[in-house]
Amino acid sequence: MPDLPQPPAGVRVLDLATCLAGPFCAATLGEFGADVIKIEQPHGGDPLRKFGTPATASGDTLVWLSETRNKRCITLDLRRPRGAELFRKLVKHADVAVENFRPGTLESWGLGYDALAAVNPGLVLVRISGYGQTGPRRSDPGFARIAHGFAGLSHLVGDPDGPPLMPGTTSLADYASGLYGALGVLLALRVKERTGQGQFIDIGLYEPIFRMLDELAPAYALNGFVRGRMGADTVNAVPHSHYPTRDGKWVAIAATSDKMFQRLAQAMGRPELAQPDALGTAARRVARREEVNAMVADWTRRFPRDEVLSRCAEGEVPCGPIYDIAEIFADPQFAARDNLLRFQDPRAGQVTVPAPVPRLSKTPARVERLGPELGADNEAVYRELLGLSAAEIADLRKDGTI
């Protein structure tokens, strides 16, 4: 079968966002074939270049190399009238633009959605900000950590008697917003195919996190229940937590139903626990949460982690290891799925980054290169799209526009 075009092949994306949410949206589209042109300030560029572990002689970081994969990078000062005019010309050749400035910033440069749609009515504009384009907080600055707190996630993370904690990474809301942005682009492009009309996509950083909090909102609306911190537990199922093993490691066990608990009780050698008048119903287990968790922990502590995993697998009990990153690199499942992409970068040498997701059977994602130097593609892009001469590009560079 001949190679099929990737889903967004032929789609051109102007990424004028900074840090992570907007750029991740654009990078996701770029992994599947979109032509992504990253636009940065001429002096310093995107702050993401300096966020994380330095990996190149110029100080570009591993985060930059990974999250700017497949992009062409140009410089352009949108705050200058000459720069804004050049951007409007670029918009004529684009299908999508992505920004994550505070609401009103693009408008102050004469580059709001209405102005850009006048230039290109089919443009899809992704707008990611802390709180969205409307509402009393629209002008407030937003970062992912703030979004986690505002959306209700941070309140749930930690032990019952401890402070709210960070949910693993401060960037979770950025990545989630970027994914919703990419989804919005694909939906909007379908509308454009039928009507020729573009639109803007409005995402507040906190909104994807709030959307993912299962029954938190409907449970409060129904009966006023305010869920608190539960450590490693979850609200409606027991045992559904993390348990220690004899060799100082941990496993996650998820007995989400009475049937799953019956299998676990059998694996533990205590089938009587699953009787209806004992702990065989979810309601009984939730009411005796600490007792149930203690029983399971006492059992897992008797064996090294691999044996707990083996016994659970034999009994068809959902159980998995709690890995650190070194264990991930050594695991055969990650290797079999090619989840770790090893890339030879001309500036940083061999760099290992997470592979793209999702996995498409006929048009898989591709990573052609990692994040380039500041302004690496100025000559190519300005010549190709706008037909500028070498002298014109040199003049733009001289006056600080690019």
Image: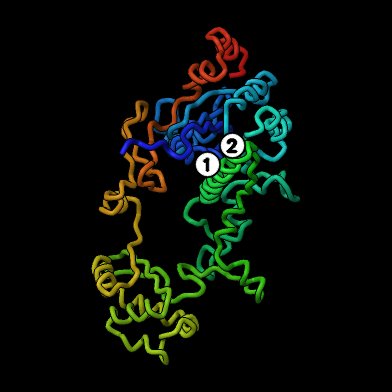
- Give the residue at x 35% y 81%: 262
Answer with left or right where residue 23 lies relative to residue 364: right
Residue that badge 2 annotates: 98
Image coordinates of residue 101 in percent, x first then y, are 64, 38
Q: Amino acid at mark 2?
A: Val
Q: Quadrant of the C terminus?
A: top right
Image coordinates of residue 212 in percent, x first then y, are 55, 59
Q: Which mark is residue 25?
A: 1
Name the foreground residue: 209 vs 196.
196
Q: What is the residue that sits farthest to the top in this orientation? A: 391
Q: Quadrant of the N terminus?
A: top left
Q: Marks 2 and 1: in contact by CB < 8 Å?
A: yes
Neighbour tally class for label 1: few under 14, some 14-19, many 20 plus, Cα within 10 Å: many
Answer with left or right where residue 79 lies relative to residue 69: right
- Give the residue at x 60% y 49%: 205
Image coordinates of residue 79 in percent, x first then y, are 67, 25
Confirm whether residue 174 shows in the render. Answer: no
Q: Quadrant of residue 398?
A: top right
Indicate the secondary structure of the residue bearing disc 1.
helix
Name the foreground residue: 172 vs 95.
95
Answer with left or right where residue 234 lies relative to residue 294: right
21 lies above or below 212? above
Neighbour tally class for label 2: few under 14, some 14-19, many 20 plus, Cα within 10 Å: many
Q: Amino acid at mark 1?
A: Cys
249 lies above or below 240? above
